[in-house]
Amino acid sequence: MIADPGYLPDRSISPDDSESMALGRRARRIDAFAQELRRELPGCTLLTDKEDVAPYECDGLAAYRQLPLGVVLAESEAQVQAVLRLCAHHSIPVVPRGAGTGLSGGAMPLREGVVLSLARMRKIINVDPYARTATLQPGVRNLAISEAASPYGLYYAPDPSSQIACTIGGNIAENSGGVHCLKYGLTVNNVLRVRAVTMDGEICEFGSHAPDAPGLDLLAVLIGSEGMFAIVTEVTVRLIPKPKVAQVVMASFDDVEVGGAAVAAIIASGIIPAGLEMLDRAAAQAVEEFVHAGYDTGAAAILLCESDGTPEEVAEEIERLTTLLEAQGATRIEISTSEAERLRFWSGRKNAFPAAGRLSPDYYCMDGTVPRRAIGPLLLRIREMEKRYQLRCINVFHAGDGNMHPLILFNGNNRDEWHRAEDFGADILETCVELGGTVTGEHGIGVEKINSMCVQFSDGERDMFFAVKHAFDPQRLLNPDKGIPTRARCAEYGRLHVRGGLLPHPEIPRF
């Protein structure tokens, strides 16, 4: 075989000529792939023109962008199989994509890779009110599941803030949560079965319609794997009955640490609210100006506690919550008196992200998790970081499970501010680890947090992660370079990552 001379080093070639040759090779590769794909799948849509693939250059983490080799819009499982087999044959990396609402760069393309979009696979195959399940394709929107189940008095519990747009396939990739995940669980707790296609085109089923399945519980391994193991083509989810009554207690606190202690006290008392969310003063002020939810903008922290169930259950739990919150130092307590008011209270929390967009040209949403007892200390540490990095940060979070969502405000057109925002975010994540938590709760690792994984996990642990990846995808073609950092990356990060003149976590071996 004669090597392509374009790949051979030639120091007589100018940088401009080299770039031109690279573009030429890229164009030839696109044409070859397009011809073979159209021959294999004449009805499949393939986008290759720059203006067509540009909308796919990033997900919700818009700071990181890359144009892909091409974008395939799959409409069936058979098409997914054929595309993966073709890409495996030519060693072309594949990045699966749902609605593109992810916030960690998990769907960011690769320059020499293909984006496989599942957005057209949005059929609701079946809603079974007797088994309380729904079977659907991966492109079905989260909220559409509950809308389809509503005539039967059922709904799908996980409700991320992006539920109007995000898809169930993406929810599985990131193990998404939402404001009601404390009582009803994350995606992993509400999915019964997944049908998926591996990189070599093999169809596999994980879990079952029954309460349990034989063998290893690989369903839990697949959920949260960020599209690195297999591509989901069909999902069966658990539906639950709509509660007869739901009410929200909104409590104000004049100190964030006192509010954090109240969260821990609620759980310690044995109460598991349907939702338990907190906003600091800056976040409450931002959302109040945006949606007029009726928040106490003078409070240092606002806690939203939802109770649901029968009227008798809710009345008893609301009374217990009110008594406990008063004992924990709440300065003001309001209880929703109608469904409209309950939704209004929640509208502030659900609109925290767009409200942040009114305060700053850009914001950077973090996703660390800490033990409930560490909520107050983390918020105080973030205040110190605001001074250190000279950037504002507003905080909203799933208080019940300690999943924090600090929103760092910055101007992306200012390169220095952007770098400070990145360092600020990494500092928050590594502080979460220091306080006994983790670098992600529901947004995934993607490309955003891959360096922070070096802080949380040892070489041996990361090697085990790669071993699982290898079992599913030996060629490392499915969403490669996401989620799991290599030893070389961690060595470089440990060598260069310095804050305040000191390396963080000096007990971690450096290379």
Image: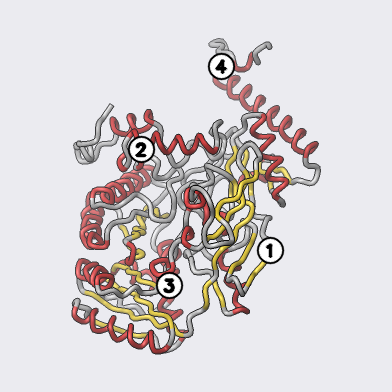
Residue 423 located left or right of residue 469: left
| Residue occupying image coordinates x 60% and y 58% | 235
The residue indicated by pointer 4 is 14
For the C terminus, the quadrant is: top left
The residue indicated by pointer 3 is 290
Instruction: From the image, state whether disc 2 or disc 3 is nearer to you.
Output: 2
Instruction: From the image, state whether disc 3 or disc 1 is nearer to you.
Output: 1
Cα–Cα span, label 1 and label 4: 57 Å
Whether 66 is drawn above or below 255: the answer is above
Whether 430 is drawn above or below 275: the answer is above
The residue indicated by pointer 2 is 461
| Nearer-N-terminus badge (2/4) | 4
Residue 396 visible in the current orientation? no
Amino acid type indicated by mark 1: Ile
The numbered disc on residue 73 is none
Residue 302, picture quadrant? bottom left
Label 4 neighbour load within 10 Å: few <14, some 14-19, many 20+: few
Amino acid type indicated by mark 4: Ser
| Residue occupying image coordinates x 20% and y 66% | 257
Q: Give 503 or 160, whichever is nearer the viewer.
A: 160
Label 3 neighbour load within 10 Å: few <14, some 14-19, many 20+: some
Cα–Cα span, label 3 and label 4: 54 Å
Cα–Cα span, label 2 and label 4: 44 Å
Residue 496 located left or right of residue 22: left
The residue indicated by pointer 1 is 125
Cα–Cα span, label 1 and label 2: 39 Å
- Tell me, yes or no, whether the two marked residues, 3 and 4, touch with CB atoms within 8 Å: no
Residue 472, picture quadrant? top right
